[in-house]
Amino acid sequence: MSWTIESAQTTKVIDGVPFAYHVAGDGEPLIMLHGSGPGVTAWSNFRDNLPVFAERFRTVMPDLPGFGGTGLPPLDDAYPRVAARWIARLMDELGFESAVFVGNSMGGAVAAELAVAAPERVRRMALMGSGGLSVGIFQTEPSEGFQRLFEFLGEPTRERMVGWLRTMVFDHTRITDELVDERLRNATADGVLDRTRAIFGSMFNPQAATTPPLWTRASTVTTPTLLLWGRDDRMLPYDQAHFATRWLPNVELHTFSRCGHWIQIERKTDFERVVTEFLTRKESATGDGTREQEVRA
C-alpha cells in the first residue's frame, strides 16, 4: 500500500480557521500529532508511518494550528492548550467521540493537555520525546536542540537549518540535501516564521499562560500512556523521560538506543510495532489506573 500527499490530504474550515489533515484507513480512530520544528507538517513527520497504521486504524494526521496548511487562531493561552482545544473541535467535525493518540514532541504536549482537559476523549496515547511533561534535570536549559532551533528562527539560513537537523537524529547520514531543502522551503514560506515565533512566544512567556506548566500537573494525566524516548535525544534529553515516568500515574517507558528525537524515522519498524501493540492491547484497569491481573486456571 502506498500513499501520496494528494490522495490522503483534505481541509476543513472550522470556525473560520482552515484545518488541513491527512486521513486513511478504517477502524478505531487514531490521531497522530507532529512536533514543532521549523518547516514541520504532519506529512513530514509521519508520511512513512501512515501505510502501517492505516492498516489497523482510521488514521488522521492533522497539521497542528499554525503549521502546514492549518491557520493559526488567536493565542489566548500557551500554545499546547490552544492546540488541544482545536484538536477537540476537529474530532467533533470528524464525528470522533474519542480516539487513541500518537504525539511527537510538541504533539505529545498537545495530546496530554487534551487528556487532562477531556480525559474521556483520549483512550490511550503513545508519546515520543514528549514536550511539556518534564523538565531538564541533568542537561542545560534550553537544550542544545532548542538553542539551534532559536538560532534558526533568529536568522533562517541553510547552515542553521542543518545545525538544527543534526540535533534531531543520531545517524547524521539521514540529513540529506533533499531533507534540508524541503524543511528550509517549508520554514521560510510566506508567514511561517512569524507564526512559529508567535507559537514559541506563547509557550515561553509566563504572562501568556493561564494555567501552571503541564509538568506540574503530570500526576493528573490518568490516560494510559506509553512514553517512547531516544536515548540520544538532544532536543528533549533522555533524563526527562524519567521525570515524566515518575509522575504519570499510568505509564510505561520504552527506550531506543542509538536514536535521537525522531524515533518514527530512525527506528521506524520498532516504533510501529511497539505503538501498535500498546494501542491495541486488551486489558482492564482498576479505578486507580493500575492493571488487573488475569486469573488463569
Image (spheres, helix red, strand yellow):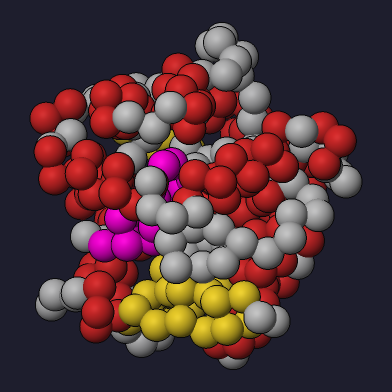
Q: Residue 273 at what x, y percent from top left?
A: 28, 56
Q: Is residue 55 visible?
A: no
Left or right of residue 218: residue 25: left
Q: Is residue 202 above or below residue 152?
A: below
Q: Residue 292 at what x, y percent from top left?
A: 62, 58
Left or right of residue 112: residue 117: right
Question: Quick one: quadrant of the N terminus?
Answer: bottom left
What residue is rendered at 62% in x and 69% in y? 87
Q: Is residue 39 magenta?
A: yes
In front of the other: 155 or 33: 155
Q: Which residues are magenta?
A: 33-47
Residue at the far front in the pictured view? 190
Q: Residue 243 at what x, y percent from top left?
A: 62, 26
What residue is rendered at 56% in x and 10% in y? 140
Rendered image quadrant of residue 72: bottom right
In front of the other: 271 or 17: 17
What residue is rendered at 32% in x and 62% in y? 43
Rendered image quadrant of residue 13: bottom right
In front of the other: 135 or 19: 19
Q: Is residue 187 above or below residue 44?
A: above
Q: Is residue 64 above or below residue 247?
A: below
Q: Is residue 277 magenta?
A: no
Left or right of residue 57: residue 219: right
Chief secondary structure of the magenta portion? loop
Q: Is residue 194 above or below residue 142?
A: below
What residue is rendered at 47% in x and 37% in y? 129
Q: Residue 199 at what x, y percent from top left?
A: 62, 46
